[in-house]
């Protein structure tokens, strides 16, 4: 029996009701263990933002209790936030071989690799972190060395599946460890956290091996250059593309920083077999006939600055898409990216390329790395948890996963759909929701981390929609009258030469507003600026139905 006050808490700091920036914590009394620390790319509403990472406020407030960060695998939505966390909280990291290699690249870029504490683990590892013993089991996914995590706590066993599917013919022969999973379930699982990405898809997810066969066929049939784009971290897919290039007697060009970095790390650690003399630089392609060239690049999500987008707009400096070339998009668009992907597909067709895109049986060029409904039910059946928390998915996916859990015997009242920050507390093996901890989005913009908030985003949205109007006025410091101006500068609002009447009216209104204030002995800058914003704002909306950002600049001489 636990002493009064002992409790186990589980919470998500990211990764529920969303796709991306996965981060979870398990805490028993004074011991906190963090699971994953990912990032996600912003949608169009996050203007100018480079990356979104989880809010680690709770961890920083309890930094003396944080024992370790355990990473399930090396995808960006599970490791992308690690460098930013370690700059604030230098805790030990436990991860598998390839995952460590990918994390090292990120830490090296930020200059914090030497002081970081990286610990290599595998599916057979066992580590003690305070009152919690941690073991692991192997899973299959779209990247090697994926791990599920088993936490032995004084309250009972908690399992986090990581991302998984049950691929029984994996490309790298890392089979899901069904026997180990069954043993864990046989010994009793108090709580299961399981990913929900494909909870809406019936059946089983096809094996990655099927994609390799279709890629090889497409490479062999292509008459000229082949361009293929996929996620850089999908090492299994990259190996099959390498094999297809070899079989079709093509040299392979790698384009995109993440593709080059990931391929380099995977090759160095033995996860990729790249024959000697297969790889060439983009500048060397002119030495070969078009049918002897294949290009593997990033940008399958239509990112504007990624290689695939630049190829589609004919703005890549070293290589061009020519009529008759074949373009293969070996990925499916993440929700929110469909428009960007459709745009670059259109551009490729305009350039005269043959384009192969779309997942599933339509092209065979992509299968998911996540388990579908029958695999999710299989995991639940193997683990037989008393309590269940679906994670890693948007709300509809979590809801569907809850229904799947009920269908295999988990009691409805023992299933918790939580939001980020919402705590599930377990005392004496009884679980219930209990309060919240701080969470949210931390926005990364260039070198700034967390210095961009809702106010700045609102200003950027206003600037992007209606532009900006700058009013420059010079006042006499001693006599308190206007020396020059107002000078009106329009950026993104109206074209000045075509709007002379409007600009004259703006000038006159600004002048009369300032003169009236000066006559009333109002000389505080903030009051003058606010009055200008209000009077000009009303006038401009009445005249144009737009609300530009109005920026008064007052100079005293």
Image (cartoon, rainbow, N blue to C red):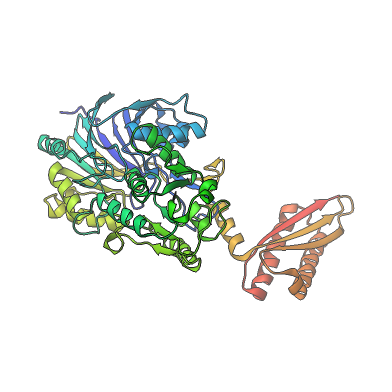
- Vertical relation: 256 (above or below) 93: below
Left-right relation of 539 to 199 = right
Left or right side of 534 for 485: right
Residue located 56% across and 40% down the image: 447
Question: Residue at the spot x=35%, y=26% of the render?
Answer: 119
Q: Position of residue 44 (x, y in %)?
A: 49, 58
Instruction: Give how far across and how far down residue 399 sits, in percent.
Output: 25, 56
Residue under the point 47% across and 52% down:
42
Can residue 407 be spotted in the picture? yes
The correct choice, above or below, for 62 with respect to 409 in the image is above
Q: Nearer the viewer, residue 71 or 324?
A: 324
Q: Is residue 514 above or below residue 298?
A: below
Q: Is residue 368 visible in the rendered structure shown here? A: no
Question: How far from the left and from the top, in percent, is residue 279?
Answer: 44, 42
Indicate the position of residue 254 as horizontal and vertical percent values.
46, 45
Q: How many marks?
A: 0
Residue 117 or residue 32, whichever sits in front: 117
Q: Is residue 165 left or right of residue 381?
A: right
Residue 465 is drawn in which quadrant? bottom right
Towards the viewer: 149 or 130: 149
- Taking depth in this image into account, of 297 and 438 the one nearest to the observer is 297
Residue drawn at x 33%, y 31% is 97
Q: Residue furthest right?
A: 479
- Kindly indicate the quadrant of the structure image that contains residue 124: top left
Question: Which quarter of the rendered picture does the N terminus lie within?
Answer: top left
């Amino acid at each position: 029996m636990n002493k009064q006050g002992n409790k186990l808490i589980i919470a998500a700091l990211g990764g529920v009701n969303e796709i991306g920036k996965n981060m979870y914590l398990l805490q028993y009394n004074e011991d906190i263990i963090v699971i994953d620390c990912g990032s996600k790319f912003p949608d169009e509403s996050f203007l100018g933002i480079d990356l979104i990472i989880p809010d680690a406020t709770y961890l920083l407030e309890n930094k003396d209790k944080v024992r370790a960060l355990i990473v399930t695998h090396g995808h960006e939505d599970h490791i992308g936030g690690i460098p930013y966390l370690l700059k604030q909280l230098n805790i030990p990291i436990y991860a598998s071989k390839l995952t460590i290699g990918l994390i090292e690249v990120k830490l090296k870029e930020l200059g914090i690799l030497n002081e970081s504490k990286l610990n290599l683990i595998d599916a057979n590892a066992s580590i003690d972190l305070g009152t919690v013993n941690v073991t692991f089991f192997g899973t299959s996914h779209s990247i090697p060395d994926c791990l599920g995590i088993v936490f032995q706590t004084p309250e009972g066993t908690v399992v986090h599946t990581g991302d998984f599917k049950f691929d029984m013919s994996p490309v790298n022969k890392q089979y899901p460890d069904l026997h180990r999973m069954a043993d864990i379930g046989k010994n009793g699982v108090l709580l299961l956290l399981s990913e929900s990405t494909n909870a809406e898809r019936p059946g089983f997810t096809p094996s990655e091996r099927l994609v390799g066969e279709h890629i090889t066929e497409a490479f062999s049939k292509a008459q000229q250059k082949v361009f293929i784009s996929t996620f850089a971290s999908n090492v299994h897919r990259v190996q099959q593309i390498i094999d297809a290039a070899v079989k079709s007697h093509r040299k392979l060009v790698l384009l995109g920083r993440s593709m080059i970095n990931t391929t380099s790390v995977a090759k160095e650690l033995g996860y990729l077999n790249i024959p000697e003399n297969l790889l060439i630089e983009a500048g060397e392609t002119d030495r070969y006939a078009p049918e002897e060239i294949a290009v593997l690049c990033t940008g399958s999500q239509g990112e504007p600055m990624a290689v695939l987008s630049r190829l589609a707009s004919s703005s890549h400096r070293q290589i061009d898409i020519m009529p008759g070339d074949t373009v293969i998009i070996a990925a499916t668009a993440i929700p929110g990216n469909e428009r960007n992907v459709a745009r670059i597909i259109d551009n490729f067709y305009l350039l005269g390329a043959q384009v192969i895109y779309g997942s599933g049986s339509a092209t065979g060029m992509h299968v998911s790395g996540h388990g579908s409904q029958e695999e999710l039910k299989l995991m639940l059946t193997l683990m037989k948890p008393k309590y269940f928390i679906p994670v890693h998915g948007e709300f509809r996916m979590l809801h569907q996963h809850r229904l799947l859990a009920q269908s295999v015997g988990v009691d409805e009242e023992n299933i918790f759909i939580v939001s980020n920050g919402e705590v599930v507390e377990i005392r004496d093996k009884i679980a219930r929701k209990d309060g919240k901890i701080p969470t949210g989005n931390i926005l990364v913009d260039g070198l700034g981390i967390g210095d961009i908030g809702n106010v700045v985003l609102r200003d950027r949205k206003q600037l992007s929609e209606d532009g900006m109007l700058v009013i420059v006025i010079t006042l006499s410091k001693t006599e308190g009258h206007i020396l020059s101006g107002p000078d009106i500068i329009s950026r993104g609002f109206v074209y000045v030469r075509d709007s002379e009447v409007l600009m004259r009216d703006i000038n006159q209104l600004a002048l009369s507003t300032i003169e009236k204030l000066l006559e009333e002995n109002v000389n505080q800058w903030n009051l003058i600026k606010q009055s200008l914003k209000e009077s000009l704002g009303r006038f401009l909306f009445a005249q144009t139905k737009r609300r530009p950002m109005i920026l008064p600049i007052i100079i005293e001489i």
